[in-house]
Structure formats: C-alpha cells, structure tokens
Image (cartoon, rainbow, N blue to C red):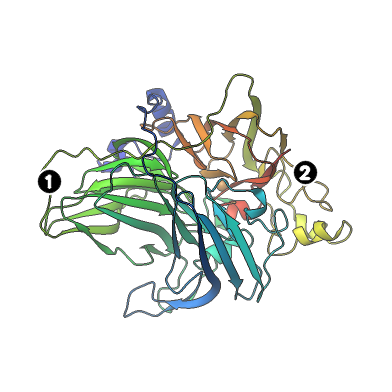
C-alpha cells in the first residue's frame, strides 16, 4: 500500500495508519443532523410467517462456467431476504439441516433477549434435524441481517447469513430499492473447494481474507437501475474479515442511513464499512446506456465490486437532492447522570486454551457453553483483560458489567491493538457521541469500527433486561476471545 502514488486513496487520506486517524480527529466530528421529520407511513400490524432451513446447497460463486461450491445457506438463493413492514410481527419456523448445531442471531434488531439467538446464553443450540421457532416484532425500520453465533468462522464462511429489510422509513418512495451484500469467499479457485476458513496468522492479526470477492454472490455483477432515478442501495458488509473503503464512481451518491438508522442525507465520498456494518445510500442512477460503479479503495489496487447500468427512458434532469428517510425511534440517551463504562479491546494476556482447562467440573450448562463449536481452543484476544471463555474456566464467564434497566450508559471503547475491530453490542442501538471517523454526522449504530489505537464514545439506554453479547465482528477475533456480555437487570 504505497502512500507515494497519487492514488485517489492517498489523496483522500483514507489510510489505515494511525497518522490517518489523528488527522481525521483533528478535523472533528460534523454537527448533529438537521432534524429528520417524523414517520409518515402508518405502522403495519399482523403477522408474517416464514419458514426456512439451514442446509448445504450448491452455488456457482465464480461464474456460470466455473466449478460450483458447497455453500451453507438459509434458502435456495444466497443471503435469504426477509422483507416486512414496520409493526408487523415475524414468525419464523426454522429447521437445521446442517451436520452441526446452529441458531439465528438477528443482528441490529432491538428485540427481547430470549429471541436473540445466542446458544447457551439465550436459547439451547438447534441440533441437526431440530426445529426452532422465533417470534418478534422488529421495532425499527431499516436494513438488518441474521447469522449464526457459534462456529461462525465456518458457518458464515460457507455463506450462512440472511438479510432483513424492515420497510416504513421512506418519506417518498425511491425509484428502486436494491440490496447489495458484500462477501468474500475462501475458495480454491481451481476446484471451488473451501480453503481453511481460519489461519493462525490471520486469527492473530487482521483476519483471514477470502480469495473471491463478490456482491450478491456474484463477481462484479451488473445491476440495472431506472436511468436517472433516485435509487436506494442497501449495502451490507457480511464478510467475516474484510473492511472496505466504498465509493461510487460515475454516479452521485448520498448516505441516508447507517446500520439502518436514518441520518440527514450527506454526500458519500468514501465510507469505511467493516464487517457486519450497513450503509443505505441513495444514488442518482446513470443516464440511459451509461454506467456507474461501486469501488473499494481500501487495498492498494481499487476493486470494482458492482456495476450499475441506467435503463429505460431516463428521468428528471434535476439536481441531485435525495429525499431523506423519516426519523427513527431509538430511545435518546440521557447523558446527565449516565453510568460510565470502559471497554478495552486488546490481545489476550495468557493466550492459553480455556477449552482444554475446562474439561472437568462445573454444571451441565458450563460444560455445554464450552462445547467445541462455541469456544475456541485458542485464545488470542480479550475485552477488559478477559477472554471468552474466561474466569476460572469451570464456570460461565461473569458479565463484563451489570447494568440497571432503564438507565443510560456512556461507554468508552479503546483499541489497544494495531488492528481494526468492528465492535458490536447486541440488543441496543447506540448513539456514537465521538469518533475519529471524518465527515460522519452524530448517528446511531449497532456496530462501530475501532481503528488502531482508536477511542470511540457511545451512549445507549439499557431498556431491556437480559444477557447481551459485546464482541468484535471480525469473526476470527470473536471466536478467539474478543467477546463478552453485559447483564441488564
Ligand atoms: Cu452480528 Cu453477535 O453478532
Ligand atoms: Cu477484532
């Protein structure tokens, strides 16, 4: 990654280096968003029933004339999409047809703890051949996703993830609504077989990268948009490892939501999107016959992830001024009298095997918690000096913090490593109060990207009881210790 070539990336100062972060923080954080207006769409009601199964299926990830791969998915098409309307209840009839246990975590949804899908913490694992029912009413509109929570390196690595779109946030319908899932695959390109999903080197550093980069499970797909229209593109980074610096070329683009949470539209220049993070963008689609692209500038050589083609007559030669989304319903943190928390993300102190040390003793739950799919035999990372699983290794780890229901907490997240960590808190959408990210308004999120030596302050209202996971969403970090939970009572 040369800082000397006059690449676009260098010009934008989008580097990974600490110097870059310092530069950005000096520029400071933008002002809060201009007020978004209240929701105009009336909430729906009723229940939507869906049924699907996790199973091995085959997919041609490298192209129609290339070998196929044995993926694990929730449906025949990759990244099973569930669309529902805000206010609707979702009833899921889920079956596990995989050779190992699994569960579904609904990432970013503020739902009751018993629906959160974390094996042993909030539900028993769903064993091969078993079924499990989930039922909840997502409180927020937006772009969300779902995935397993044990052996995630292999299960997500093989493609086990789905997308949930909750409609009802638009003030004016856009001309198109496109879901764009970014995910790489660890494939042997000659055979289509899997390469090891994790490597010692990757797990200790920035993660193990895929070899085949795709959008919607295709290499650089061409997506047709109504020419000249204002089109919503819901971008989801569902990769286990890869951080992208995303930019649209040949099209105007504005950010309208971050992790599904509406913000006043602002121009998208380049946005660093880490694993599990989402960005809703409105683009002005190319003129008839013209094309635009989505490019990742993170690596030295920019990568075109998707091409967008303008089709049809073409509309409105007007200036680009996309309609905003309506205001979200996230409870506003009350900073006065808030509780203070600190989370330090670091390497593990000992690096020893918690699993090996936990073999005997403890009750059934303790042993189950440490089953081989839910705990690694390697511990590389920690939060506040504790690695998951931790403690004396014969008990379920204690919570990192016990919080009082209804109280606001301000949490300072610090990165004591030279690597990037996308940090996710289950169950609560938090307000990002200060960050080194340049050009972003104050916004709500469920996952934040801690760059090396970074410090981010977030605040949230602990409004629902339960055990809520906190972890790095770089899956090899999560699976080798960088995970814990807070208990809300
Ligand atoms: Cu995407 Cu524990 O979460
Ligand atoms: Cu991490």
Q: Where is residue 380 in the image (x, y as percent from the top left)?
A: 65, 50
Label placed on residue 398: 2
Looking at the image, residue 194 lies above or below residue 152: below
Looking at the image, residue 252 lies above or below residue 305: above
**Dot 2: element:** loop
Looking at the image, residue 477 lies above or below residue 216: above
- Of 90 and 58, the residue lying toward us: 90
First in residue order: circle 1 vs circle 2: 1
Left or right of 105 in this view: 309: left
Q: Quadrant of the C terminus?
A: top right
- Of 76 and 137, the residue lying toward us: 137
- Of 375 and 411, the residue lying toward us: 411
Residue receiving disc 1: 316
**Which residue shows up at 13% across the image and 56% down it?**
290
Q: Position of residue 421 (x, y in %)?
A: 53, 44
Kindly indicate the quadrant of the structure image that contains residue 323: top left
**Which residue shows up at 11% across the image and 57% down it?**
288
**Dot 1: element:** loop
């Amino acid at each position: 990654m040369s800082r000397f070539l006059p690449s676009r990336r260098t010009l934008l100062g989008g580097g990974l280096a600490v110097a870059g972060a310092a530069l950005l923080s000096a520029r400071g954080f933008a002002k809060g968003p201009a007020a978004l207006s209240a929701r105009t769409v009336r909430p729906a009601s009723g229940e939507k029933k869906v049924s699907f199964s996790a199973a091995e299926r085959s997919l041609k990830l490298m192209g129609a004339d290339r070998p196929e791969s044995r993926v694990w998915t929730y449906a025949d098409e990759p990244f099973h999409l569930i669309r529902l309307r805000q206010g609707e209840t979702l009833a899921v009839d889920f079956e596990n047809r995989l050779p190992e246990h699994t569960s579904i975590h609904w990432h970013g949804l503020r739902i009751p703890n018993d629906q959160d899908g974390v094996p042993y913490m909030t539900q028993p694992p769903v064993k091969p051949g078993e079924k499990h029912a989930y039922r909840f009413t997502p409180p927020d509109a937006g772009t969300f996703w779902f995935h397993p929570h044990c052996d995630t390196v292999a299960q997500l690595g093989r493609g086990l993830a789905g997308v949930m779109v909750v409609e009802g946030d638009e003030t004016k319908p856009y001309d198109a609504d496109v879901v764009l899932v970014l995910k790489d695959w660890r494939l042997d390109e000659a055979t289509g077989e899997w390469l090891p999903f994790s490597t010692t080197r990757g797990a200790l550093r920035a993660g193990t990268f895929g070899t085949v980069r795709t959008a919607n499970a295709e290499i650089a797909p061409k997506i047709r948009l109504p020419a000249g229209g204002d089109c919503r593109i819901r971008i989801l980074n569902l990769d286990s490892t890869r951080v992208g610096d995303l930019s649209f070329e040949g099209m105007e683009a504005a950010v309208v939501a971050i992790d599904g949470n509406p913000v006043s539209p602002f121009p998208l220049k380049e946005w660093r999107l880490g694993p599990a993070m989402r960005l809703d963008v409105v683009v002005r689609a190319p003129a008839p016959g013209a094309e635009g692209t989505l490019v990742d500038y993170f690596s030295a050589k920019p990568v075109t992830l998707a091409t967008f083609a303008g089709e049809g007559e073409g509309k409105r030669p007007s200036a680009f001024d996309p309609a905003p989304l309506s205001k979200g319903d996230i409870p506003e943190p009350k900073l006065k009298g808030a509780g203070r928390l600190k989370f330090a993300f670091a390497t593990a102190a000992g690096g020893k095997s918690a699993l090996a040390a936990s073999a005997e003793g403890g009750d059934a739950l303790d042993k189950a918690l440490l089953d081989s799919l839910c705990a690694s035999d390697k511990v590389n990372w920690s939060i506040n000096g504790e690695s998951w699983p931790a403690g004396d290794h014969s008990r379920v780890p204690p919570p990192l913090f016990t919080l009082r229901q209804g109280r606001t907490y301000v949490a300072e997240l610090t990165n004591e490593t030279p690597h990037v960590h996308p940090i996710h808190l289950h169950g609560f959408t938090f307000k990002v109060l200060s960050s080194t990210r340049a050009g972003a308004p104050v916004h709500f999120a469920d996952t934040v990207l801690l760059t090396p030596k970074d410090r981010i302050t977030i605040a949230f209202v602990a409004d629902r009881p339960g055990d809520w996971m906190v972890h790095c969403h770089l899956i090899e970090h999560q699976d080798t210790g960088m995970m814990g939970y807070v208990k809300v009572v």
